[in-house]
Image: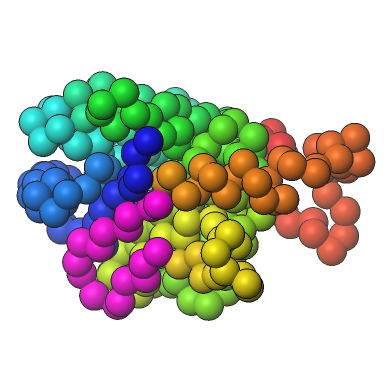
């Protein structure tokens, strides 16, 4: 059984253009592969460095999923024999989407995801939200696979996102991000990993990018170990403030053993009690004018 699954968190400063980000991103992928990564993951909307100003600017910056920017990372994945999770502003109708594509070590697309919980209280109201939380098997070679899923930034603030991914079989969840990662947001990610017994790999932009501060993290979801008398720290890695490539080696075999014996995740859930979780409509104090009910 595969012992580890290594995710490279590409905590990079973006350039001024998509071409600059493409070139810098490809070079970072080469460095990640040389360091032994199985998958390289970019921060949120790498194609334009998470720039959202107006509908007109978004239309200019959006790139097609089958276009040169995205497909250059598919070719790079095949060249390096390493999976790549590339993020981009996707051309989409009626408005662009905040998107992720994961290409496996053969350059095949295995996961397509668009941010479901757009920040409609802010400029992301100009985007089209995604409509689900898919998972996919990622080939690691030698007959080994790992099931992955994704959340993008604000998605992590909804426990339902990670819960659905766990129910979909995800073992490691990829979380591209673009915001200040402080104690509360990092604690959210720790909580999502603990309650679902899943690995969570989050990559943020470093200090120097507006409203970002680095601190990319990975948690393995193993709260208890058979050889320990108390709970353990699930933190695999936490980056500092600045630009860099940070390796997160998830102990895949131990994660699977933990999921087979511990009590979180789906083990003792009672779905028949949770009907209110899918009820529509907002009640005070949670009513906001900016909520887009057509996507409820």
| Magenta-colored stretch includes residue 154 | no
Residue 68 visible to an observer of this rendering: no
Q: Nearer the viewer, residue 145 or 26?
A: 145
- At a point 19% along the width and 37% down the height, the residue shown is 82
| Residue that extends furthest to the right in the rendered view of this protein | 273
Say if 245 sits above or below 139 in the image. below
Quadrant hosting residue 270: top right
Q: Is-magenta flag for residue 248? A: yes
**Can residue 10 be seen in the rendering of this structure?**
yes
How many discs mark residues in the rendered view?
Answer: 0
Q: Quadrant of residue 90?
A: top left
Left or right: residue 178 versus residue 247 is right
Image quadrant holding the C terminus, namely top right
Q: Image height check: is 245 above or below 251?
A: below
Quadrant of the frame with the N terminus: top left
At a point 21% along the width and 30% down the height, the residue shown is 105
* Residue drawn where x is 21% and y is 48% of the image: 37
Residue drawn at 50 percent across, 48 percent down: 255
Q: Main secondary structure of the magenta part?
A: strand
Residue 108 sits above or below residue 58 on the image = above
Q: Please state which of residues 289 and 158 is positioned toward the viewer in this rendering.
A: 158
- Which residue is nearer to you in this view: 70 or 38? 38
Q: Position of residue 173 (x, y in %)?
A: 47, 45
- Residue 87: give x, y in percent of width and height: 32, 43
Applied colour scheme: rainbow
Where residue 192 appears, x then y in whole percent?
60, 56
Q: Which residues are magenta?
A: 236-251
In the image, residue 272 lies at what x, y percent? 90, 35
């Amino acid at each position: 059984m595969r012992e580890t699954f290594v995710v490279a968190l590409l905590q990079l400063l973006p350039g001024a253009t998509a071409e600059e980000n493409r070139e810098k991103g490809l070079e970072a992928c080469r460095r990640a592969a040389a360091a032994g990564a199985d998958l390289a993951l970019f921060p949120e909307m790498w194609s334009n460095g998470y720039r959202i100003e107006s509908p007109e600017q978004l239309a200019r910056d959006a790139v097609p999923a089958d276009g040169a920017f995205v497909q250059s990372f598919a070719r790079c994945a095949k060249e390096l024999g390493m999976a790549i999770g590339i993020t981009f502003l996707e051309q989409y109708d009626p408005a662009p989407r905040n998107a992720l594509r994961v290409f496996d070590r053969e350059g095949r697309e295995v996961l397509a995801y668009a941010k479901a919980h757009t920040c409609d209280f802010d400029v992301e109201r100009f985007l089209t939200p995604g409509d689900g939380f898919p998972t996919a098997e990622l080939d690691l070679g030698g007959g080994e696979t790992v099931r992955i899923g994704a959340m993008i930034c604000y998605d992590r603030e909804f426990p339902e996102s990670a819960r659905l991914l766990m129910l979909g079989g995800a073992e490691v969840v990829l979380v591209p991000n673009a915001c200040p990662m402080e104690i509360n947001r990092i604690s959210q990610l720790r909580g999502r990993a603990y309650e679902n017994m899943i690995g969570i790999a989050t990559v943020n932009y470093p200090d120097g990018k507006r409203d970002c501060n680095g601190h990319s993290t990975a948690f393995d979801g193993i709260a208890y170990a058979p050889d320990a008398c108390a709970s353990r720290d699930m933190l695999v890695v936490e980056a500092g403030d600045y630009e860099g490539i940070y390796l997160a080696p998830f102990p895949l075999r131990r994660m699977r053993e933990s999921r087979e014996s511990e009590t979180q995740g789906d083990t003792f859930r009672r779905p028949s009690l949770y009907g209110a979780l899918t009820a529509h409509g907002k009640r005070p104090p949670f009513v906001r004018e900016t909520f887009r009910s057509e996507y409820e």
